[in-house]
Image (tube, helix red, strand yellow):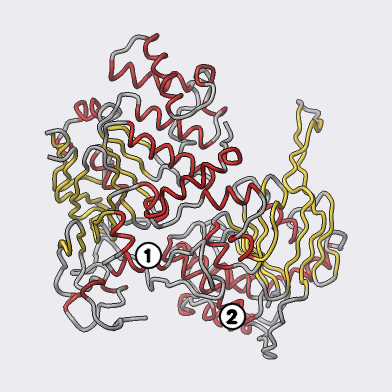
Amino acid sequence: MALLEVRDLHTYFRTRAGEVKAVDGVSFDVEVGEMLGIVGESGCGKSVTVLSLMGLVQPPGRVVQGSAFFQGRDLVKLKGREMEDIRGHEIGMIFQDPMTSLNPTLTIGTQITETLRRHLDMNKKEARKRAIELLDEVHIPNAAKRLDDYPHRYSGGMRQRVMIAIALACNPKLLIADEPTTALDVTVQAGVLDLFHELRTQHEMGVIIITHDMGVVAETANDIVVMYAGQIVEHATALDLFDRPEHPYTEALLSALPQVEGEGIREGRLLSIPGRPPDLIDPPPACRFAPRCLYAGQDDCAVVPPELREIRPDHWVRSAHPASERAGEPVGVT
Amino acid sequence: MSEARTDGAKPTTGDALLTVRDLKKYFPVKEGFLIDRTVDHVRAVDDVSFEVRAGETLGLVGESGSGKTTTGFCVLQLLKPTAGSVQFDGRELTTMSRRDLREIRREMQIVFQDPYASLNPRMTVGDIVAEPLVIHGVGNRRSRRRSAEQLLEVVGFNPDFINRYPHEFSGGQRQRIGIARALALNPRLIVCDEPVSALDVSIQAQILNLLKDLQNEFGLAYLFIAHDLAVVRTMSDRIAVMNTGKIVEYGPAEDVYAHPKDPYSQALLAAVPIPDPRRMRERRAERRKHKDVLAEPV
């Protein structure tokens, strides 16, 4: 049994205009020692997926269906207090913006020890000692001294390291990081990504990293889920996904990326995806990517919803026209 | 375009259109209550020199706080430089009268980063695009409306929506409106300040392609400011890398990316995540070499 087993998760938001199907039937596993990357563009449901797991979806949103088994318990069914015991203890979390996720009126030390004392019942002295170890572990120089500083004395990258330290404080089994480096400069991001890599190999835990950046997943995750319009459209090992992407959306996303290396870059054009993602109140009835797909031709893409199927071992795709089954040229829009 | 460039003559790249020499912009740091005194300066831009040739793109790349946006603003005289010279088409801008500046701004326009903040929410799309024409007294109401329609068409925005308001459109569509507005006066230079950093990848590709097409069609020169090295690479003929107010590397894009000479630009390039998991190990090793330069601020 996997550390985390998410099955058929549906999270909807009730709005005046109708029900927004933000997450619509998502399933995946996370194993100990594994780093799962969830990638997709704004509004694809990647953040709502993990917020659902942690019981952090606020009304008018709610999980309407599905389960998420974590160490034998279904996270979706847990009550407030039970969930609080797990959050920050067995499941650590890191959010995008290190500027707003720390309390500016408390010292860094207070914020780390708070977690330790809440969950592990440590006394003040023990907690402080552990906090220093944690800051050392995320490579904050001069940890013992910096513990008494307030967040404004820390740079963005260092604050994100503090967030990681807090998330790791109770030795969680699962670490969830939602766009952990998006707010950081590229040179700072590099350091934080390297830290993730290091921690994953040192701690016995599973990690979920959510990002819009294909470069970031490629450098961190070993297993990747691509989301589009509330659904998983492709799920594969990192190597196979980048070597042989199957879903037309994944292919398009990869070819829309500007490249840093190569020739003739300046003269060339990027392949762009026509149109934009569908409205999730009333998504396309069958394949959600069909209206933008280069291969959705005269066939039944608009009628028969494609299932997520295993096209080869450990490579799942939700499309009637995966790359390895296509012959010839695109038939649809250009 | 408004007064359509019917000659079709595309300026040949080569002649300097914009020449910036020893540009400085210092912001005073003040202290004191009631009576301020200047205790120090932030050297946001410190002795920066470069040129942009007609019809080419100069990419200005750097991290937050490197001074790239301040440089762009000083070029357009939206900020008054502390020292140095900015010449556009051989004319000095730093000493120019407001009236003359206004006249020359027809030729130099800007596209801003945030398409949500840079369009007036109370103006219709048509009015936004035609506003530069109103300011510069070009044509009459009718001709301006026709120009706005044409401009929107050029940037791939459905002109039927001319009477709608910006909030009805997505980020990518709004950025098209911003670009149409920048094109209205037939400029020769457009300063693009992070024009795609607020957009998703698939939409970003659409906008970058549009900027390339417009450049080819109208012979525009771009000063293209961005933090994303891949985006800058795809747009630029030449590159200037900025760090803490100074240009640390300057040259043809191919050279800068293939053989960066400055330690900071080397580190910056090594830090970019590459979408290829097979190279993870190699990239990590490469980054270790630049450990000293990459040391984070604490």
Nearest the camera: A308 or B87?
A308
Q: Residue at x 76, y 25 (%)?
A: B33
Q: Amino acid at mark 2?
A: Arg
Residue drawn where x is 50% and y is 69% of the image? B207
Label of residue A108 in the image: none
Numbered disc 2: secondary structure: helix
The type of residue carrying mark 1 is Leu
Q: Chain of mark 1?
A: A
Horizontal relation, residue B173 to residue A176: left or right: right
Q: Is residue B296 above or below residue B113?
A: above
Give the quadrant of residue B52: bottom right
Where is residue A37 shown, x and y percent of the image?
31, 49
Q: For mark 2, what is the residue?
A: B145
Give the secondary structure at mark 1.
helix
In the displayed structure, does residue B151 sit left or right of residue A245?
right
Q: Position of residue A94 (x, y in %)?
A: 37, 36
Quadrant, the C terminus of chain A: bottom left
Q: Which residue corresponds to mark 1?
A: A253
Judge whether B28 appears above or below B139 on screen.
Answer: above
Marks 2 and 1 on same chain: no
B195, above or below A194, in the image: below
Of marks 2 and 1, the one in the foreground = 1
The residue nearer to you, when weighing B151 against A109, is A109
